[in-house]
Amino acid sequence: MQPEALRNLVTTALQDMKGADIRALDVRGLTALTDFMVIASGTSDRHVKSLARNVQDEARRAGVKPMGVEGEAEGEWVLVDLRDVVVHVMRPQVRDFYNLEKLWSIGPEAEQTPPARAASRERG
């Protein structure tokens, strides 16, 4: 799956579960680890876990196996590594504290990409 298609799949999976403030950052010019970082907020630890689980489930259905998942037990911040897309789902307080958007948007190559809602309806 192409990185852009995977990014769209992830943002759709987050939107479908009512993820808040979803941001997709193009970090190809900043790191060789991944192409996109997707950051979203959940309203509670349970919601954060559900969002991360839906991302994993949708990725697996599309044939993409997560390389790793961290923080699922606590639910404050769950990281899902899908190689080309790294997903961070956090409680709002944690997100405000770490401010990943600012950290990863320092270069001119990094741009915030709004979620593609239209693409989500094409698949299903």
Image (cartoon, grey):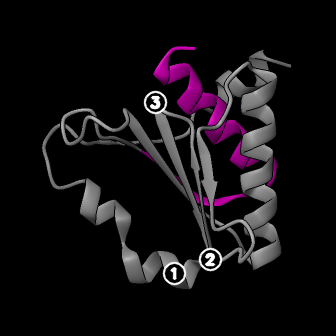
Question: What residue did someone put label 2 on?
Answer: 91
Q: Residue at x 70, y 58 (%)?
A: 19
Q: Is residue 4 magenta?
A: yes
Image position, residue 77 (x, y; %): 59, 70
Image: magenta residue range: 1-24
Q: Secondary structure at mark 2?
A: loop
**Mark in the foreground, 2 or 3:** 3
- The picture quadrant where one finds residue 7 is top right
| Rendered image: mark on residue 84 | 3
Q: Is residue 45 above or below residue 57?
A: below
Mark sitting on residue 94: 1
Image quadrant assignment for residue 113: top left
The mark that comes first in sequence, 2 or 3, is: 3
What residue appears at the point 49 percent right and 33 percent down from the top-left corner? Answer: 83
Q: CA distance from mark 2 to mark 3?
A: 23 Å
Do tag 2 and tag 1 residues touch (Cβ < 8 Å)?
Answer: yes
Nearer to us of marks 3 and 1 is 3
Q: How many marks?
A: 3
Q: Residue 67, image x and y in percent?
A: 59, 38
Residue at (36%, 65%) from the top-left corner? 100
Determine whether, in the image, residue 58 is placed left or right of residue 82: right
| 25 up-or-down from 123: above or below | below
- 112 and 94: which is toward the camera: 94
Report, in whole angstroms, how far the alpha carbon at label 2 lies from the one at label 1: 5 Å
**Neighbours of disc 1 within 10 Å: few (<14), some (14-19), many (20+):** few
Kind of residue sitting beneath label 3? Asp
User: 7 above or below 110?
Assistant: above
> Toward which corner of the image does residue 41 lie, by quadrant?
bottom right
